[in-house]
Structures are given as C-alpha cells and as structure tokens.
Image (cartoon, rainbow, N blue to C red):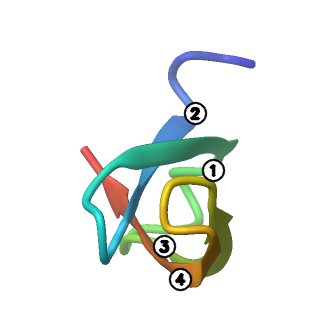
Amino acid sequence: MSQDNLVKFECAECKRVTCFSNKNKKTLKNRLELKKHCKYCKKHTTHKETK
C-alpha cells in the first residue's frame, strides 16, 4: 500500500487502531466513518479515521 494514501481507523468504543485502508485525498476531503468488525470488542462498531 502507498504510504501517502494510507489511513488508520480507530474503534469508537475501545479506541484502538484496528484496520488500515486507502483513500483518495484529492476527492475525499472530510474524514471517513465506517462500520467494521473490531477484533478486540468482538462486534461490529463504528470506526473513525485518525491522523
């Protein structure tokens, strides 16, 4: 994965960084918020993009 397009996602409940993804920063200016599975909480939670 390219390092300049790489974004980290943090779980909203346990506050751990659980997954990474790519993002086109030219077209998407605001931060992403997705529902993903957290392996620490063991359920689907909201994950927000961090810096």
Disc 1 designates what residue?
23
Amino acid marked by disc 2: Asn
Disc 4 designates what residue?
45
Amino acid marked by disc 4: Thr
The circle on residue 4 is none
Counting residues from the N terminus, which is met first, the one under dot 1 or under dot 4? 1
Counting residues from the N terminus, which is met first, the one under dot 1 or under dot 3? 1
- Residue found 58% across the figure and 33% down from its top: 5
- Residue found 59% across the figure and 45% down from its top: 19
Front residue of this view, candidates 50 and 4: 50
Amino acid marked by disc 3: Leu
Q: In the image, which is nearer the foreground, mark 4 or mark 2?
A: 4
Counting residues from the N terminus, which is met first, the one under dot 4 or under dot 2? 2
Could one spot residue 8 in this view of the protein? no
**Residue 23 at x, y = what percent?**
63, 50
Disc 3 designates what residue?
32
Q: In the image, which is nearer the foreground, mark 2 or mark 3?
A: 3
- Residue found 25% across the figure and 59% down from its top: 15
Could one spot residue 24 in this view of the protein? yes
Counting residues from the N terminus, which is met first, the one under dot 4 or under dot 3? 3
Distance from label 4 to label 2 (Cα)? 23 Å
Quadrant hosting residue 3: top right
- Residue found 40% across the figure and 44% down from its top: 17
Q: What is the secondary structure assignment of the residue under circle 3?
A: loop
Front residue of this view, candidates 43 and 24: 43
Distance from label 2 to label 3 (Cα)? 13 Å
CB under 8 Å between discs 1 and 3: yes
